[in-house]
Amino acid sequence: MQAVKNSIALEVIRKARKNLEGVVSTTPLVYMKNFSELYGAEIYFKREDAQVVRSYKIRGAYNKIQGLSEEALNNGIVCASAGNHAQGVAYACNKLKVQGTIFMPVTTPNQKIAQVRMFGGEYVDIQLVGDSYDDSHHAADEFCAAKNGTYVHPFADEEVIAGQGTVGFEILEQQSDIDFVFMPVGGGGLASGVGSVFHELSPKTQLIGVEPEGAPSLATSLKNGVNTALDSIDKFVDGAAVKKMGDLNFECCKHLLHGTDVIPEGAICSTILKVYNENALVVEPAGALSIAALEKHKEQIKGKKVVCVVSGGNNDITRMEEMKERTLLYEGKKHYFIINFPQRAGALKEFVVEVLGPNDDISYFEYTKKNNRANGPAVVGLELKSKNDFEPLLERMKEKGFLGRYLNDNEELFQFII
């Protein structure tokens, strides 16, 4: 059995760059003043959110498709994607005038589905199947077998990885003497490609792969010593929610990366809101991973030159309320309780006046009444100005007899509220 490679040859990535001339943008590498001051470092964002399809995925998709034989193209292109790879494939199909069938999870944000339709036009057919990328991938495999289609994998393909690796060449042309590069990891195509470039051309640079806590396929595989499929994943970070990496991707990441991080979804949401409010940048959850990891490395990166690859900006504005909620929960500023209000007049007023602090707000309240009397508990959500206000709030609730059941740490009950 032939051993799996652990990097992609530079000549393969250079060829990919030639293939992409006139198709992809050379995205800017931007100095971020606020993050640099916050962490005492020289921090740059590689803005792949400014790419043609608002993510780096066009690089790998186009490189793969343009190199296919005429017979393979005539059989029709097939792919599965949570969104960004689909947009890259759609763009490539339209530009090269070949038909494509794109399988996407039902849970894909509407904004990404609309973008696929726009980029692909008459050359793509979208099939919404399953709840995750892996479900769509299975359906695409079956479709390929039945129709003899040509499958373009989003990450487990050398030509796709080579296309993503062109990001690495650009970074090194835009800045030298880089100490750290932080990259998101889902399937591992970007990390494998960029890692291969830096391994050869800037071996002193520390390469850090960053995954969402709800889908740590790389971290799990590294722990097990073998590429491992996760039993289940949280699909919130849809651009990096993959149950299993490709074998080639795993071997590359294992060999090339100097470290890996797993970031809670709440921290990712907090980062999305920060860059939106402070920098007017719209980044998707996977695109925020590399930025969110800075906090965990704040001591290591002091005085260093750091690049965060912002992998995409395809964020659905309708998800912002959910992101705000996840942010508040992560930061300890949002709390839910079941409260048994005494069945007497003035109980609610007493709770508001004597229990809540001056900066505490009721953000959720569900209270069942029957015959104008309290009949059962109320579910109450409270938003605090600071996480330090939580313990004093609990003490007042206990003292006044209002504390019932705390819900934030009860997943079974909590899922019905959030």
Image (spheres, grey):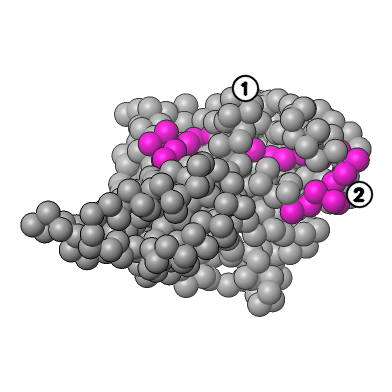
Q: Is residue 301 left or right of residue 362?
A: right
Do tag 1 and tag 2 residues touch (Cβ < 8 Å)? no
Q: Residue 306 lies in magenta, yes or no?
A: yes
Q: Amino acid at mark 2?
A: Lys
- Which three-letter amino acid code belongs to the residue tagged 1? Gly
- Which badge, 1 or 2, comes first in the chain's sequence? 1
Left or right of residue 134, residue 175 in this image: right
Q: Magenta part of the protein: which range?
A: 296-322
Look at the image and tell me in which quarter the C terminus lies.
bottom left
The answer to whether one can see residue 69 in this image is no
Instruction: State the residue in front, 333 or 398.
Output: 398
Q: Secondary structure at mark 2?
A: loop
Q: Residue at x 44, y 53 (%)?
A: 355
In this rendering, the answer to whether 76 lies above or below 223 is above
Q: For residue 204, which numbered disc appears in the image? A: 2
Q: Where, by quadrant of the figure, is residue 42 drawn?
A: top right
The image's mark for residue 22 is 1
Instruction: Give the spatial CA distance, label 1 vs label 2.
Output: 32 Å
Percent x, y for residue 317?
Answer: 42, 33
Query: Residue 29: image x %, image y %?
Result: 74, 28
Q: Name the quadrant containing residue 285.
A: top right
Residue shown at 81% from the left, 58% from the top:
258
User: Is residue 3 something that shows in the picture?
Assistant: yes
Element type at mark 1: loop
Label annotation for residue 309: none
Q: How far across and how far down the image is residue 159, in percent? A: 62, 47
Asked whether, in this view, residue 397 is left or right of residue 105, the answer is right
